[in-house]
C-alpha cells in the first residue's frame, strides 16, 4: 500500500484579538493518520476536507495549489491557517 503524503498545518496570523483556544502564530502540526493533539477542534473540523484532499493528491478549491490559507470559523477571533503537503525527502546514502 502506498504511503499517503503528510500535511502541515501552521497558524500564520491572528487578525482579531486573541484566540480563546490558545492558538498562537507559529503553532504547527504534521497531519498523518490521527487527529493532531493540541489543535482547536473547530479549526480541525473546518480544515479536515482540505487536509484529506491534499493527502489523496486532490486540488484545493481556493487556488488549485498545494499551499492554501483558511480561517477558523470563529468570526470574532480569526486565526489564519496555512495548509500544505509535506513532500518526503529520499534518504541520502
Image (spheres, rainbow, N blue to C red):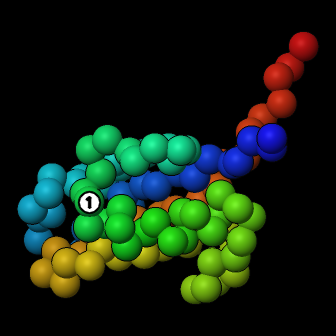
> Does residue 16 appear in this view?
no
In the image, taking residue 32 as reference, residue 38 lies left or right, namely left
In the image, taking residue 87 as reference, residue 49 lies left or right, namely left
The total of numbered circles placed on residues is 1
The x and y percentages for residue 65 are 69, 74
Q: Nearer the viewer, residue 53 or 25?
A: 53
Q: Which residue is rendered at x = 9% and y = 62% of the image? A: 20
Check the image and report above or below for 48 versus 2: below
> Does residue 82 appear in this view?
yes
The x and y percentages for residue 46 are 37, 73
Q: Which residue is rendered at x = 80% and y = 41% of the image? A: 1
Question: Quadrant of residue 13 in the image?
Answer: bottom left
Which quadrant of the figure contains the C terminus? top right
The x and y percentages for residue 14 are 25, 68
Question: Quadrant of residue 61 in the image?
Answer: bottom right
Q: Which residue is rendered at x = 69% and y = 48% of the image? A: 5
In the current view of this chain or complex, which residue is farthest to the top?
93
In the image, taking residue 41 as reference, residue 88 lies left or right, namely right
Q: Nearer the viewer, residue 52 or 78?
A: 52
Q: Secondary structure at mark 1?
A: helix
Q: Nearer the viewer, residue 4 or 67?
A: 4
In the image, taking residue 29 as reference, residue 58 lies left or right, namely right
In the current view of this chain or complex, which residue is farthest to the right?
93
Check the image and report above or below for 75 versus 22: below
The x and y percentages for residue 54 are 65, 64
**Residue highlighted by disc 1:** 41
Q: Which residue is rendered at x = 26% and y = 67% of the image? A: 42
How packed mark 1 is, by other alpha carbons closer than 10 Å (few <14, some 14-19, many 20 or more), is few
Amino acid at each position: 500500500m502506498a504511503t499517503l503524503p503528510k500535511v502541515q498545518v501552521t497558524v500564520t496570523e491572528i487578525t482579531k484579538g486573541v484566540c480563546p483556544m490558545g492558538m498562537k502564530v507559529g503553532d504547527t502540526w504534521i497531519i498523518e493518520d490521527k487527529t493532531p493533539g493540541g489543535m482547536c477542534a473547530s479549526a480541525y473540523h473546518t480544515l479536515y476536507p482540505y487536509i484529506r484532499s491534499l493527502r489523496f493528491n486532490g486540488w484545493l478549491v481556493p487556488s488549485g495549489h498545494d499551499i492554501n490559507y483558511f480561517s477558523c470559523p470563529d468570526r470574532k477571533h480569526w486565526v489564519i491557517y496555512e495548509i500544505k503537503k509535506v513532500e518526503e525527502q529520499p534518504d541520502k546514502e
